[in-house]
Image: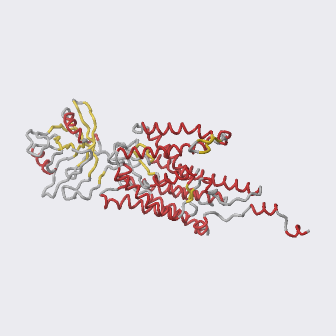
Amino acid sequence: KGEMAASAVLALLLASALAGAAAGGDIVHQDDQAPKIPGCNNDFVLVKVQSWVGGNEGDEFVGVGARFGPKIVSKEKQATREPLTLADPIHACAPVLQLVSGGVLLVERGKCKFTKKAKLAEAAGASGILIINSGTSFTRWSARRTKRSLTYTYPQFSCPKMQAKLCVRFLQLILGVQLYSPDRPVVDTAEVFLWLMAVGTVLCASYWSAWSAREAVTEQEKLLKDGHEVSLTVEGGGSSGIVDINVISAMMFVVVASCFLIMLYKLMSAWFIDLLVVIFCIGGVEGLQTCLVAILSRWFTSAAGSFVKVPFFGAISYLTMAVSPFCVVFAVLWAIYRQFPYAWIAQDILGIALIVTVIQIVRVPNLKVGSVLLSCAFLYDIFWVFVSKSLFHESVMIAVARGDNTDEDGVPMLLKIPRMFDPWGGYSIIGFGDILLPGLVVAFAMRYDWAGKKSLRCGYFLWSASAYGTGLLITYVALNLMDGHGQPALLYIVPFTLGTLMSLGWKRGELRNLWFKGEPERVCTHQGYLQMAKPPPAAAAH
């Protein structure tokens, strides 16, 4: 159990490095470096490029609209089909030889300025220009200061560098294109299910944590009744594998998580993603195994209570040995087929099992430690989502969550659900830290209620869980208002969760007890047992 506790602490640090990575994918790309001037003040928006071959609908590509030109329509039925002409010369850095006559001109990136390409395309009679990028990413391009506005559309199509020539040969077969930039739905069902998944995980983990604490207290009271000397702790002590966070470790969270996040950002590559997948699988196997054993032990009591010694692992129950192969196979199959469309289901199962296990093992002993932990995470979240843009020219947290510079959809330490009704597709995601860190405080509230035998209405768990759900809901509202830009979820969750607990504690006169002691005042029932075992002094004298 000690090894499990150490693994849980490591998982807490690694998973919490992605606190605040709630995102749905960007349509509008903000870029303060590209100037906005009259005639050149459009937002950089994603553009769908629908191809047509011989009157039949062909493949669809994605590009980025230019800073200048008229805004691209958002509905496909409003977009006109334009003939596509391959530029000659292909880079359009010299006068175009052919007459385009109102169609869209297809060119390669080349080395000349975008404004020069625009002028030459306009001189050839083009109504728009479609550029194949020489790199693997979208290039945002704008006009420099000019005396007049440009009056045609300038979307861009990005093609991988090694496949640029192949794309050109393929696009020569396309007779027409249709350009439009559809809007995302105001609310996607993926966000609703992701909210339910996050809140449900916190509720289940809190219940398990409180139930384990109550079982430990019950066992201690039985031992005291039998006359054994044991220490009275709600968590059951270190021998049970429970780890209590203190103020110092809560403050160190910011330093350790920041170092890990920077390492992710700087080393993000295919091999590093594979390393993270291996780490995630190990944590997921342990979490899934712990959850399954806890559930199945209710029915298979004999297998759960019978142990066998295994080299390097110590005493392991027969039930654990029976469940472990399934968990290993489950994680390995996910790792192999994680690029498949429905692999997100297995990733979410492993992630939820890991989060629930960590919340059950790692515990906040009082509100003071919980406040320090969430306050540090609050500042950490804001810094790496917003402030890091000024230092790294992009949000480090969002870049890591998306898995930039890799072929993956993102790092595995995320819960994600595909955006089912979004024309752009993609996933709605939430970092483990946005569930795990507030979940530690919500679980503390439930343990406090159960120890004090408080009802739901008179306790703290119901209100803290509701506050967490409300904060997460506001996160998704802000996410949609910001056109899908990633939001620091803890910016909204922490004030709601901590504010609710502190306000209720102050109103009920229990804030000091919550803050320092972390458990309600209760009668020490074992005193009665000790008095029954020892006769009073007067009786002993006779």
Could you say which quadrant of the image residue 127 lies in?
top left
Residue 51, x across and y down, in percent:
24, 36
Q: Which color scheme is applied? A: secondary structure
**Which residue is drawn at the image coordinates 63% and 63% (left, top)?**
519
- Image location of residue 202, percent across then percent down: 54, 52
On the picture, is 344 further left or further right than 483?
right
Quadrant in which the C terminus is drawn:
bottom right
Residue 522, position as x, y percentages in the image:
69, 64
Q: Residue at x 28, y 41 (%)?
A: 76
Q: Nearer the viewer, residue 48 or 236?
A: 236
Residue 161 placement, left or right of 412 = left
The residue positioned 27% from the left and 32% from the top of the image is 57
Direction right: furthest residue: 542
List x then y, in percent, for residue 305. Answer: 67, 42
The quarter holding residue 258 reads: bottom left
Q: Is residue 112 visible in the rendered structure shown here?
A: yes
Q: Residue furthest front?
A: 311
Q: Nearer the viewer, residue 41 or 494?
A: 494
Look at the image and tell me whether residue 508 can be seen.
no
